[in-house]
Image (tube, rainbow, N blue to C red):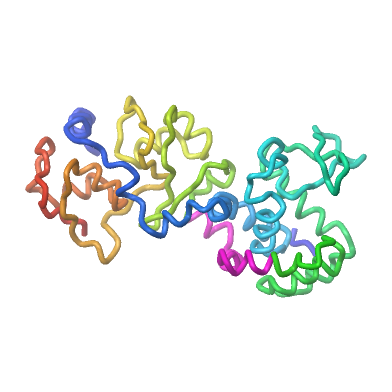
């Protein structure tokens, strides 16, 4: 059932010579829509769901839909305080930390996890370790409807509408696409480091690149700890220097930027406050490539409004 560079001084002067564009100009319509808490949850935790699917053959779409439903898209007190995404109770076999919460009008003990991965792993073990769910593993990995109905039939939930709630979430947020993912594909998208450093911070995608939007007090060190991407790589990926002070609203890429902009963006018409670095962040193009494509713009020259900056 289970399958087991730019010179440092030049870059510093360039960054100080203009105002960095903030997230308001870098977020596409698609990314703006991803600010919905349910979509944020999916973007944050789909690597864990794919990881579990590959390990235990449970559809990632089902795991994500159950996580969304059980945790209120990560907003339940149990999830926020205990990393417990699936309402797994602490029975006598549980040797770890536990907490109390209400369930059906009575106080119950629930498991506390150091990391969300523990909750996802226990969810998989719960399904694979009970014979009443064995028939589900005979279904195709892409048969999320069969899984949703089978969970209810096997007694996973008392709510008669439970299957339709899962199916509705899967179809509304296109979760079934992750049933065709692999950890290799996730690693290609996010980098293998992020698989061991999933956090509740919203992760956005634009220009085929993943990034976060900085909050007040963020530093390269704190973001490295939270995302699993090293401080050195965060600095390098974003064409910044090690003493740069991150500001709220800064776009911080978690991957190496592209060598050119995605179609149909061939040129950028400059706006007030634009500089080469802000343009490189907006389109996810490495600063060195932007400068190479636009030799007419010297490092210290302030861009005029209406100039055309080549992107590919």
Which quadrant holds residue 62? bottom right
> Quick one: 306 or 107, which is closer to the camera?
107
How many numbered discs, if any?
Answer: 0
Relative horizontal placement of residue 192, taking residue 57 as reference (left or right): left
> Quick one: 149 or 159, which is closer to the camera?
159
Q: Is residue 14 above or below residue 47?
A: above
Q: Quadrant of the N terminus?
A: bottom right
Residue 89 image point, x, y percent:
84, 44
Queried whether the magenta region covers residue 182, the answer comes back as: yes
Q: Quadrant of the C terminus?
A: bottom left
> Quick one: 30 or 63, which is closer to the camera?
30
Queried whether the magenta region covers residue 83, the answer comes back as: no
Residue at 58% x, 61% y is 182
Q: Main secondary structure of the magenta part?
A: helix
Residue at 62% x, 66% y is 170
Residue at 85% x, 70% y is 153
Residue 244 image point, x, y percent:
32, 28
Q: Which residues are magenta?
A: 166-188
Which quadrant holds residue 149? bottom right
Q: Is residue 172 above or below residue 294?
A: below
Which quadrant holds residue 12? top left
Residue 268 image point, x, y percent:
19, 55
Residue at 40% x, 33% y is 232
């Amino acid at each position: 059932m289970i399958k087991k560079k730019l010179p440092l001084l030049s870059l510093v002067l360039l960054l100080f010579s203009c105002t960095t564009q903030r997230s308001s100009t870098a977020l596409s319509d698609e990314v703006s829509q991803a600010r919905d808490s349910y979509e944020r949850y999916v973007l944050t935790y789909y690597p864990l769901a794919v990881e579990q699917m590959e390990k235990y053959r449970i559809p990632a779409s089902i795991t994500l839909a159950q996580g969304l439903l059980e945790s209120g898209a990560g907003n339940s007190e149990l999830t926020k305080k205990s990393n417990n995404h699936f309402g797994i109770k602490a029975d006598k076999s549980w040797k770890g930390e536990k907490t109390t919460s209400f369930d059906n009008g009575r106080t119950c003990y629930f498991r506390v996890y150091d990391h969300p991965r523990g909750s996802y792993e226990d969810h998989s073990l719960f399904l694979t370790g009970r014979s009443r769910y064995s028939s589900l593993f005979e279904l195709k990995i892409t048969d999320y409807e069969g899984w949703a109905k089978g969970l209810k039939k096997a007694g996973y939930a008392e709510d008669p509408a439970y299957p339709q709630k899962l199916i509705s979430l899967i179809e509304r947020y296109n979760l079934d696409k992750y049933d065709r993912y692999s950890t290799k594909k996730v690693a290609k998208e996010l980098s293998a480091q992020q698989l061991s450093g999933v956090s509740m911070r919203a992760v956005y995608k634009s220009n085929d690149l993943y990034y976060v939007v900085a909050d007040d007090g963020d530093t390269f060190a704190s973001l490295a700890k939270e995302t699993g991407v090293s401080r050195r790589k965060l600095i390098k990926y974003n064409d910044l220097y090690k003493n740069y002070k991150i500001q709220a609203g800064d776009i911080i890429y978690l991957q190496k930027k592209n060598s050119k902009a995605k179609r149909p963006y061939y040129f950028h018409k400059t706006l007030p406050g634009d500089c080469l670095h802000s343009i490189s962040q907006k389109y996810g193009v490495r600063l060195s490539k932007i400068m190479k494509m636009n030799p007419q713009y010297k490092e210290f020259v302030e861009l005029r409004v209406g100039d055309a900056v080549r992107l590919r």
